[in-house]
């Protein structure tokens, strides 16, 4: 196993945690960059004893450079450090962006550095609670053949497993993760608001067993896991939902309609719902969308005990 002298540029939520995990696996963290109080605090808490330094000094000191800056900063950081000679020949340069592949590291490759895209498909807090979550996490990785062994070693050292992603599929890979994980948060939050408005005093407790089961079933069985009024063709139930939601939770009508349409399309396409039944459901959804409530007429809704304005 190869041990690296690792430099971290961006001691943010991801940088501090991955560096701590690499240190635990036997690598040396030579320096970390981060100016804000939050980043300095993470260096102290997660990487005690690691010197703070400016990005160019971190890059010069490392034989493996971890670039854990916001996605939009990455091109400039790579360009600046490559042009100044801080990123150097033979150095491994690793970023953790999901969207970007190797192209964003082209300036580094041009000076002889060895680029790797290594994205943990995980959400981070920047604290110790993230460390055990890395075990069994999947890392979306893109690297040329020469860098594959080191990429595999890094993922193994972090406790995860690699998923190889082609350069031209990075954005699709990342969109899939964002659609699943980020939009799930919006969906669950909306469901909790509706249950609170229906009088539930602990919507999270009500939803947790149901949603855990639905998530497990969907991950195991895909479309076959679907239950509920759309796959049953219960047109009147869907109509009643929409009438009630327009009265009591109007801000959720657009996402309900969008997801109901997507669900309907899938169950008709795969033959679980007769097209005639599907057409009736589509009529109900179309009628509800043409009556969409204008944002200005949306009433404030109690969200988890708080009154919020939309
Ligand atoms: N958060 C997640 O759950 C997650 C999950 C997977 C992958 N990622 C990816 O990991 C990367 C880092 O995300 P993050 O959530 O850890 O970000 P973050 O918490 O916002 O931290 C960003 C770090 O980059 C530093 N930074 C910002 N602009 C910089 C610049 N121009 N030059 C040098 N350093 C700069 C910040 O320093 P200051 O604090 O001093 O501003 C901070 O230490 C991104 O590519 C993101 O897509 C994030």
Image: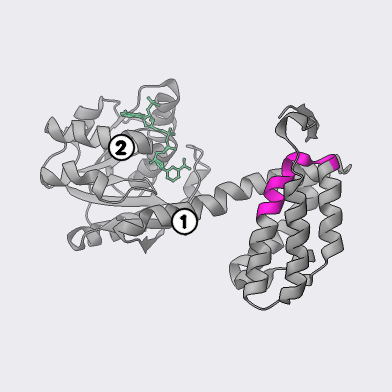
Expressed as whole percent of the image width and height from the top left, the position of residue 226 reads 70, 68
With 244 as the anchor, is 55 left or right in this view?
A: left
- The residues colored magenta run 247-258
Residue at 47% over, 59% down = 136
With 197 as the anchor, is 207 left or right in this view?
A: left
Q: In which quadrant will I find the N terminus?
A: bottom left
In this rendering, which labeled residue sits more in front, label 2 or label 1?
A: 2
Residue at 20% over, 63% down = 145
- The residue carrying mark 1 has its beta carbon less than 8 Å from ligand 1: no
Magenta stretch: dominant secondary structure: helix
Q: Helix, strand, or loop for circle 1?
A: loop
Residue at 87% over, 44% down = 198
Residue at 30% over, 57% down = 167
Is residue 307 on the magenta stretch? no
- The residue carrying mark 2 has its beta carbon less than 8 Å from ligand 1: yes
Expressed as whole percent of the image width and height from the top left, the position of residue 307 reads 79, 27
Instruction: Tell me if residue 262 can be seen.
Output: yes
Instruction: Tell me if residue 209 can be seen.
Output: no
Labels 2 and 1: the sequence-earlier one = 2
Closer to us: 113 or 169: 169
Query: How far apart are the two marked residues, 2 and 1, measured between alpha carbons?
Result: 26 Å
For disc 2, the neighbor class at 10 Å (few under 14, some 14 to 19, many from 20) is: some
Expressed as whole percent of the image width and height from the top left, the position of residue 293 reads 76, 39
Q: Which mark is residue 135?
A: 1
Expressed as whole percent of the image width and height from the top left, the position of residue 95 reads 31, 45
For disc 1, the neighbor class at 10 Å (few under 14, some 14 to 19, many from 20) is: some
Q: Which mark is residue 74?
A: 2
- Picture quarter containing residue 302? top right
Is residue 256 on the magenta stretch? yes
* In the rendered image, the vertical position of residue 305 relative to residue 221, given as above or below: above
Q: Helix, strand, or loop for circle 2?
A: helix
């Amino acid at each position: 196993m190869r041990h690296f002298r690792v430099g971290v540029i961006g001691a943010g939520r991801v940088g501090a945690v991955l560096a701590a995990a690499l240190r635990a696996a036997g690598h040396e963290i030579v320096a970390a960059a981060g100016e804000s109080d939050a980043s300095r605090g993470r260096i102290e808490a997660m990487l005690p004893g690691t010197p703070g330094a400016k990005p160019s000094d971190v890059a010069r000191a490392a034989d493996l450079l971890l670039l854990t800056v916001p996605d939009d900063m990455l091109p400039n950081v790579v360009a600046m450090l490559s042009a100044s000679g801080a990123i150097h020949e033979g150095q491994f340069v690793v970023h953790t962006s999901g969207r970007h592949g190797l192209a964003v590291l082209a300036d580094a490759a041009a000076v002889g550095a060895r680029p790797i895209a290594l994205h943990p498909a995980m959400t981070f807090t920047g604290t110790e609670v993230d460390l055990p979550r890395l075990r069994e996490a999947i890392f979306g990785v893109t690297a040329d053949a020469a860098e594959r062994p080191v990429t595999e070693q890094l993922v193994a050292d972090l406790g995860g497993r690699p998923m190889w992603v082609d350069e031209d599929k990075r954005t699709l890979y990342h969109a899939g993760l964002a659609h699943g994980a980020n939009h799930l948060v919006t969906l669950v939050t909306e469901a909790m608001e509706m249950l609170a408005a229906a009088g539930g005093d602990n919507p999270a407790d009500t939803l947790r067993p149901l949603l855990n089961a639905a998530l497990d079933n969907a991950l195991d069985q895909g479309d076959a896991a679907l239950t509920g009024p759309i796959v049953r063709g219960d047109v009147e139930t869907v109509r009643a939902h929409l009438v009630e939601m327009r009265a009591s939770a109007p801000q959720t009508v657009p996402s309900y309609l969008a997801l109901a349409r997507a669900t309907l399309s899938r169950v008709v396409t795969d033959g679980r719902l007769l097209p005639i039944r599907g057409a009736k459901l589509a009529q109900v959804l179309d009628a509800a969308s043409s009556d969409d409530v204008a944002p200005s007429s949306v009433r404030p809704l109690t969200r988890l005990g708080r009154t919020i304005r939309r």
